[in-house]
Image: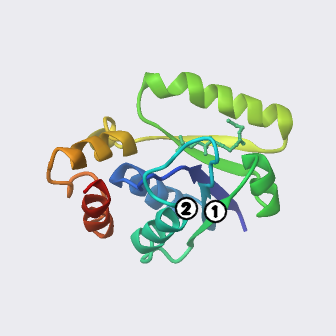
Amino acid sequence: MITAIYPGSFDPVTLGHLDIITRSAAMFDKVIIGVLNNTSKTPLFSLEERVNMLKDAVSDLDNVSVESFNGLLVDFVKQKKSNIIIRGLRALTDFDLEMQMAQGNRVVAPDVDTVFLSTSVQYSYLSSSVVKEYARYGVDLKEFVPECVISQLIDKIK
Ligand code: PNS
């Protein structure tokens, strides 16, 4: 039984995240999405809102669940009896930071590995920040976020 953890801020979840989640769910027995309760960033959506939007978005995936976590990612990974972190790589610009995080995590927890999935080409430009920017300017959001996120994003931006 192999459990993998897909961590992030998910402010909000995008179709790019969902692409990584769906592909991970086909690779591992169980995928737990870990939503960071980050006290140093001020997210647009509350922790509860981010968790609920994700739960909605993955409701058709039987082996995927959503939880929040505080503190170090590797502690959450171990607490969930996992040793695999999943991260999506969009472009070279992601590489530096992702490599630094993966290597740092391995120093702190040598038995935890990071598996990188390359983002599908159609989502290579997509990020939660870009989506929030589009929402502010009234762009149709259906190409960017799951259906259940659209109205909440529009309400929030208002
Ligand atoms: O969606 P994001 O904001 O790119 O996700 C970043 C995340 C949550 C994976 C990263 O910030 C994280 O793991 N934070 C938890 C604190 C931690 O473990 N820090 C050490 C590794 S950077």
- Give the number of the disc on residue 47: 2
Circle 1 Cα neighbour tier, 10 Å, few/some/many (<14 / 14–19 / ≥20): some
Q: The N terminus lies in which quarter of the figure? A: bottom right
Closer mark to the observer between disc 2 and disc 1: 2
Q: Residue at x 73, y 29 (%)?
A: 103
On the image, the x and y values in percent for residue 23 come to 46, 56
79 horizontally vs 26: left or right: right
- Asked if the residue under mark 1 is in contact with the one under mark 2, i.e. CB atoms within 8 Å, the reply is yes
Quick check: 133 above or below 51? above
Could you tell me how far apart the alpha carbons at marks 2 and 1 are, in whole angstroms? Answer: 8 Å
Q: Name the residue under label 1.
A: 68
Q: Name the amino acid, label 1.
A: Ser
Q: How is the image coloured?
A: rainbow
56 horizontally vs 67: left or right: left
Q: Name the amino acid, label 2.
A: Leu
Please tell me which of labels 2 and 1 falls first in the chain.
2
On the image, the x and y values in percent for residue 121 come to 30, 39
136 horizontally vs 109: left or right: left
